[in-house]
Amino acid sequence: MIDTRGLSLAQAPPFHVPARFFLTAPFFALLAGILLLWEGPASLASRWLPLALAATHLITIGYLGLLMCGALLQLLPVVLGAPVPAVRWVGNLTHPLLGLGALLLAGGLGFGLPWSLASGAMASAMGFLVFLFPVALALWRAQGEPGTRRALRAAVLALLATLLLGLLLSAFLLGLIPLDDFTHWANAHLLWGLLGWVGLLVIGVAIQVIPLFYVTPPYPARVRAWLGPTLLVLILLASLAEVRGWGLTATLAQGLATGAFVFFALLSLRLLAQRGRRRLDPTLLHWLVALLAVIAAALAWALQAPSALIGILLLVGLGVGLPAGMLFKILPFLAWFHLQHRQIATGRFDLRIPHMGSLLPLGWARLQFGLHLLALLLAVATIFLPVLARPAGLALVLAALVLEGLLVRVVLAYWRASRALTLPL
């Protein structure tokens, strides 16, 4: 059972607000796997290939974007005591805009459709902007744990920078503006998106949930206080140096930022080794693989390995796997918590609500982790054995399908119990 002391559970948004984000996201990982299955070895030959760009944005906007936005709408009021203003409206607008934007943007990048690229860029931008301003206001008012608060504020700033650079690159691809060196601007966009938005958000969440879920010692106070702001400055310096063509400065800043992420991953692994709950559940396994993928990606960058290898480690190992593992705990907890509140409100103590462990079968969660790990290993091996690309795509598809099935099971169980609680005696 999760220790809920220190959490502002009474301020949580309605169950359906984050649940719709969580339920939709696996379809985009499924589509990315289908692209890999369809295109085969050519799709991983370079990150600049059209279908590689399409799959990347299906994961970053469709999968990660939906999951991270849905999680923040839930996390801010519960962990930091900072409810997002008009959270229902934010959810109702952000969810379809990001989903549609990811589909259209992937279509435009993957198949060379200017109208799809333009529409996808605008829909994604509108979805993120609708989300950003209320969330920034909530973070400004937040009073919770300072380390989490600083890391999440830095992540939101990084998302804004990622969004602006993405719009700039889209305008260039559509022939609306000139850019001196597209590659440098694209690298800056990548830095802000992966190291900034994703990386800083993972740090902010880890600081809170690893001690909470696994009964580990807390992260050191100096790490909580300074890691997020320091990384934000390093990413800013690296991106400025990248677009200005200051190669040595860009490499140095990226190296320092990479080193900081490796330090955090090693520290997290050390804390997890000291955990009070020794069971290797699927959520913990996803954390371990994600942290090891971060370290492997840093080593690959230092050794000047192919950029496709680094992208696979970060996008699949961290970006696809870790949120899936977190959902194994978050969604059952949310369902159980909301059912408890409904039971108290209706006075239906004659009914027994499902406990967290029964909502999500552990065996199927282990299968999902195994399929994800297989997809990651095959995708990494594809860099050296291209014939493995389609098996990697198939494993990614199956992992997404099992994840979706698990999430649907939790939501259906919630709605059945919720309906029973509202029926008259």
Image (cartoon, rainbow, N blue to C red):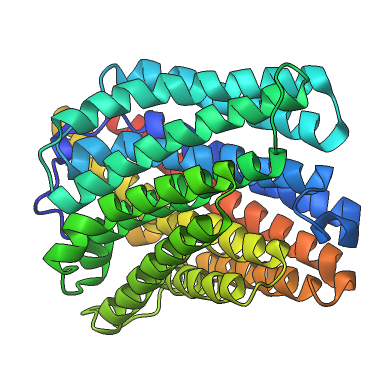
Q: Quadrant of the N terminus?
A: bottom left
Residue at image location 87% in from the left, 33% down from the top: 111
Residue at image location 51% in from the left, 22% down from the top: 127
Q: Position of residue 117 (x, y in %)?
A: 74, 24
- Tell which of 276 and 294 is nearer to you: 294
Residue at image location 43% in from the left, 42% down from the top: 68
Q: How many marks?
A: 0
In the image, taking residue 129 as reference, residue 374 lies left or right, namely right
Residue at image location 57% in from the left, 65% down from the top: 317
- Tell which of 248 and 311 is nearer to you: 248
Is residue 175 shown above or below 363?
A: above
- Tell which of 234 and 4 is nearer to you: 234
In the image, taking residue 326 as reference, residue 86 lies left or right, namely left
- Asked whether the viewer can see residue 107, the reply is yes
- Tell which of 414 and 324 is nearer to you: 324
In the image, taking residue 88 as reference, residue 219 lies left or right, namely left
Residue 348, by quadrant, is top left
- Asked whether the viewer can see residue 423, the reply is no
Q: Position of residue 7 (x, y in %)?
A: 14, 47
Q: Position of residue 377 (x, y in %)?
A: 68, 75
Is residue 266 shown above or below 238?
A: below
Is residue 315 shown above or below 123?
A: below
Q: Quadrant of the C terminus?
A: top left
